[in-house]
Image (cartoon, rainbow, N blue to C red):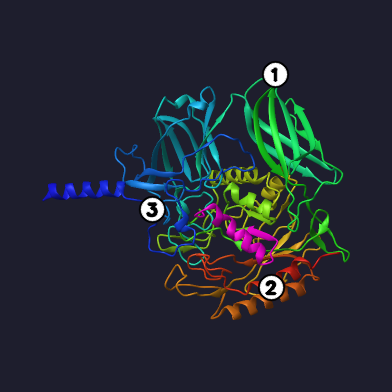
Amino acid sequence: MKRIALILTLAATVAGANAQWKPVGGKILTPWAEKVDPKAPLPEYPRPAMKRGEWKNLNGEWNYAILPKGQKAPESWQGKILVPYAVESALSGVGKRVSDNEELWYERSFTVPKTWDGRRTLLHFGAVDWLADVWVNGVKVGSHSGGYTPFSFDVTDALQKGDNTVTLRVWDPTNRGYQPRGKQTQKPTGIWYTPVTGIWQTVWLEPVGENHIASLNITPDIDAGELSVGADLAGDGHMKLEVDVYDGARKVASGAAVNGEKANVAMPADMKLWSPDSPNLYGLKVRLVKDGKVVDQVDSYTAMRKISTGRDENGVVRMELNNKPLFQMGPLDQGWWPDGLYTAPTDEALAYDIKKTKDLGFNMIRKHVKVEPARWYTHCDSLGILVWQDMPSGDRGPQWIDDKYFDGTEFARSEESEAQYRKEWKEIMDFCYNNPSVVVWVPFNEAWGQFKTPEIVAWTKKYDPSRLVNPASGGNHYPVGDMLDLHHYPEPKLYLYDAMRPTVLGEYGGIGLVVKDHIWEPDKNWGYVKFNSPKEVTDTYVDYAGKLLDLVPNGFSAGVYTQTTDVEGEVNGLMTYDRKVLKVDEKAVREANQKLVHSLDGK
């Protein structure tokens, strides 16, 4: 009998390993789930702000295994996982949880194109949550901690002719660790969602020369009419950086620098400024020249825009875009998907929420305690939407552990925790730096893991003086940074005012509506207030927008409505979680939002 059971178990394992991919889990799906091609999921170039012509996508089916923490690489695999969807997601084809006492292993084979011979090969990961160790052909090529930003390794010296194998080990303690994790928890409930473990963005290969551009640093200055372009360079010897700026197909400016200096490019006198109403982008061609020969070239883009603060005609400090007051109005955007969790099913889906946000009359998005793939920010750049970028919360944030709820007061950041926060926040700022849509950094949400606020805000501002810093959205308030951010549910309320900084309403609303057949949970659904019809939701939204409009002369300079979509048990989205139902009257909401967006025109 034991032998029969063993044979059946082995047969089931083989069948599972060879099973055809399909979404799992029995939850709702978005319209794009059926468009996922398991042979080529997310085939688009993953880094549009620094693009080369040659690359190879490694997305697709990989082997996977979930093993107790500390074990060696698996000798056999438990099945196939569709990369880059997290193992807990429906689109991964697995739909399994990984505890803090387990590790997730991946493996796949690949070949390097013959045309890449003589060059270095970089292995890129868009994002892996949280601690990743990587081997190629059994040779350790690197490690990375941080769940939200890209990393890469030069794997050239580990490659062999013909087939190669990449192996990945991931550990993610979720809310049992100190690391930034946003809304993830091992016990999803209320505003806390399903964990995300492992690879959740594109994996890809790229050939480069010994001397090449590792990254770009692009800073516009509309007051000086100048564009600064710097680059981190790999290689040695003296090299020259050359930059050409294009308006469409027409070259409009050029610049160059040597000795590691930045190229300062004088822009045309009639340069086009970027704004949500006119999201003008300039194309860039950046070349690296050594001994008179171009050794590397990347395509990029930028925009001429400025974010600042200033007093309006009535003496109220406002946020300004391109030296003019602009009321920023946007939704709180969690960036979660019922089928992909952290990962949108397709690039079309990734852009959809942004387009719908624009359709609803918003001009801003607050990206809430999550970081998106590079293509999301490029969609914001090209579509014209301002972005407030949160740092994902962690450590002392409210959480459930072993059926006990902690409100955050019983935790204190360790030296290790603080170092990890600083490391990941710097990487996030570096990652988003070149995106003109990103105009505000938010290092803390409410008091979730908030620590050393004046110090963190001062460092953030010094590291990137080109953007505004929202010190703690709705958190413990200090007279530091560039704004005072209040939270109040459900209706807007101005209960504090700062005469020296803009005062903003960083969260309000939360109007709930359950739409049958479009919910994640059959029960346990909630909103800050709940209604029974789209008309009631729309009327209440318009009423709240009107109240916010009345408070603009008294000091509010921005508003953030909760939220873009339902997320798991939260039903306070403008859309259902599956994006199949818009729960409000689009025209009425757009009109209400546009009144706010234009409320400071001419001030």
Give the mark, 3 or 2, whose residue is nearer the N terminus: 3
Q: Residues within 10 Å of mark 3 (few under 14, many from 20)?
A: many
Give the mark, 1 or 3, whose residue is nearer the N terminus: 3
Q: Residues within 10 Å of mark 2 (few under 14, many from 20)?
A: many
- Is residue 474 in view? no
- Of tags 1 and 2, which is closer to the observer? 1
The magenta stretch spans residue 431:
no
Image location of residue 74, percent across then percent down: 32, 39
Task: Return the residue at label 3.
Answer: 93
For the residue pair 59 and 511, the one nearer the viewer reads as: 59
Q: Which residues are magenta?
A: 344-366
Amino acid type of the residue tagged 1 in the rendering: Asp
Helix, strand or loop status at disc 1: loop
- On screen, residue 5 versus residue 243, left or right, reads left
Give the mark, 1 or 2, whose residue is nearer the N terminus: 1
Helix, strand or loop status at disc 3: loop
The C terminus, quarter of image: bottom right
Q: Quadrant of residue 592?
A: bottom right
- Of tags 3 and 2, which is closer to the observer? 3
Q: Residues within 10 Å of mark 1 (few under 14, many from 20)?
A: few
Indicate which disc residue 492 carries.
2
Task: Return the residue at label 1.
Answer: 291
Q: Mark 1 and mark 2: span between their CA atoms?
A: 62 Å
Q: Residue at x 70, y 36 (%)?
A: 285
In the picture as drawn, the residue positioned furthest to the right comes out as 313
Amino acid type of the residue tagged 2 in the rendering: Pro
